[in-house]
Image (cartoon, grey):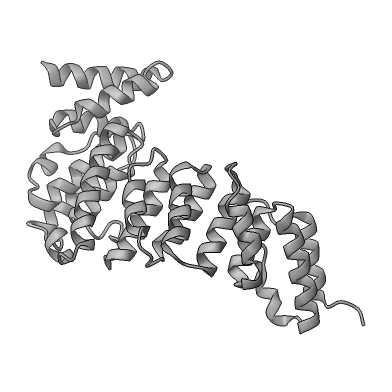
């Protein structure tokens, strides 16, 4: 009897090493295989894993193949870092959760290649083992902006907080997030440190509502007009009179948004942040000047003008 389409497809995927950009093989086809075919597919998967194929090692964890634990243990203990070791550690944590296996994945969150750090963060976000919280809190300080973003989402998940809805939530959680995802270290690093302190309080038992108060606008109509000016396309400057009229959480959010946009080389944000004399704005402006001033004459003029204004 010939092999089924599902087995042939899986074996072909193994042979071609899967889709570019994927991190595991499609294990959903196993439910459509006979027991004999599944055994044949598992044997081929294990052979690929023994050769150091990271996707095969990841798929072992997805399939929960506990018989492969000795193989995972061996590869996870390899003193040489790499994607194979990182994948083996993640699958080992899925199959054998413990403080030790959590610590190994947490180690990859700090030292592995970028893609494996992202996968480690995603996995740790859903784990309850000791050490996962601390690993995520430490990773808030990562230079990789995408990793900080994923870790932020993981901490929201672990603390029961809902992610702020873009364009609808202007509260302190949303304002902190805007600073955290900035490309400029002088903006994101203080935000990461503050976020770490606040999440620690929640993880220690303090109610999330007292750490991140619910959003309340002092003047929704004024906020909406200021938002419309902020998001206007083109070269027209942001209407500073509207932003200056904001207070409380609305003003905090708008200032965070402007600081974040400086990292996106937004000329309107550069001008507005300086004109409003946002606290701490000189650090991001100087960092942006050092990063892009030599290659972008328009940015150079805008930032120098902003710094001259602030120092006048």
Q: Position of residue 147 (x, y in %)?
A: 42, 47
The answer to whether any part of residue 50 appears in the image is yes
Question: Where does residue 197 sit, x and y in percent of width and height?
Answer: 20, 50
- Seen at 22% across and 37% down, the residue is 238
Q: Which residue is at 69% across, 56% downward?
A: 19
- Left or right for 130, reference 210: right
Tell me the residue at 25%/49% (across/down): 196
Q: Quadrant of the N terminus?
A: bottom right
Horizontal side, residue 52 vs residue 274: left or right: right
The front one of 57 and 254 is: 57
In the rendered image, residue 169, in percent from the top left (x then y), is placed at 23, 59
Farthest right residue?
1
Q: Is residue 88 above or below residue 69?
A: above
Q: In percent of the image, x 32 and y 65: which residue is there?
A: 158
Q: Quadrant of residue 190?
A: top left
Residue 239 picture location, percent across and down: 17, 39
| Frontmost residue, 73 versus 211 | 73
């Amino acid at each position: 009897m010939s092999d089924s389409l599902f087995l042939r497809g899986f074996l072909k995927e193994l042979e071609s090493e899967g889709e570019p950009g994927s991190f595991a093989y499609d294990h959903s086809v196993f439910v459509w295989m006979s027991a004999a075919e599944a055994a044949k597919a598992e044997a081929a998967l294990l052979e690929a894993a023994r050769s150091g194929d990271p996707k095969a090692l990841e798929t072992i964890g997805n399939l929960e193949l506990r018989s492969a634990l000795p193989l995972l243990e061996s590869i996870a203990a390899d003193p040489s870092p790499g994607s194979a070791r990182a994948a083996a550690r993640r699958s080992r944590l899925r199959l054998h959760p413990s403080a030790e296996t959590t610590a190994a994945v947490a180690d990859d969150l700090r030292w592995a290649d970028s893609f494996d750090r992202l996968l480690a963060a995603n996995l740790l976000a859903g784990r309850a083992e000791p050490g996962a919280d601390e690993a995520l809190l430490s990773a808030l300080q990562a230079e990789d902006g995408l990793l900080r973003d994923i870790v932020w989402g993981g901490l929201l998940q672990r603390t029961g907080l809902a992610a702020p809805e873009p364009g609808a939530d202007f509260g302190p959680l949303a304002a902190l997030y805007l600073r955290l995802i900035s490309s400029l270290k002088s903006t994101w690093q203080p935000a990461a440190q503050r976020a770490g302190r606040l999440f620690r309080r929640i993880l220690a038992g303090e109610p999330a509502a007292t750490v991140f108060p619910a959003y309340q606008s002092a003047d929704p109509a004024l906020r909406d007009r200021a938002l419309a000016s902020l998001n206007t396309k083109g070269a027209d400057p942001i209407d500073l009179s509207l932003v200056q009229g904001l207070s409380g959480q609305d003003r905090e959010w708008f200032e965070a948004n402007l600081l974040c946009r400086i990292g996106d080389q937004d000329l309107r944000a550069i001008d507005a942040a300086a004109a409003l004399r946002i606290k701490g704005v000189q650090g991001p402006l100087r960092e942006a000047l050092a990063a892009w001033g030599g290659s972008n004459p328009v940015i150079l003029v805008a930032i120098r003008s902003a710094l001259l204004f602030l120092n006048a």
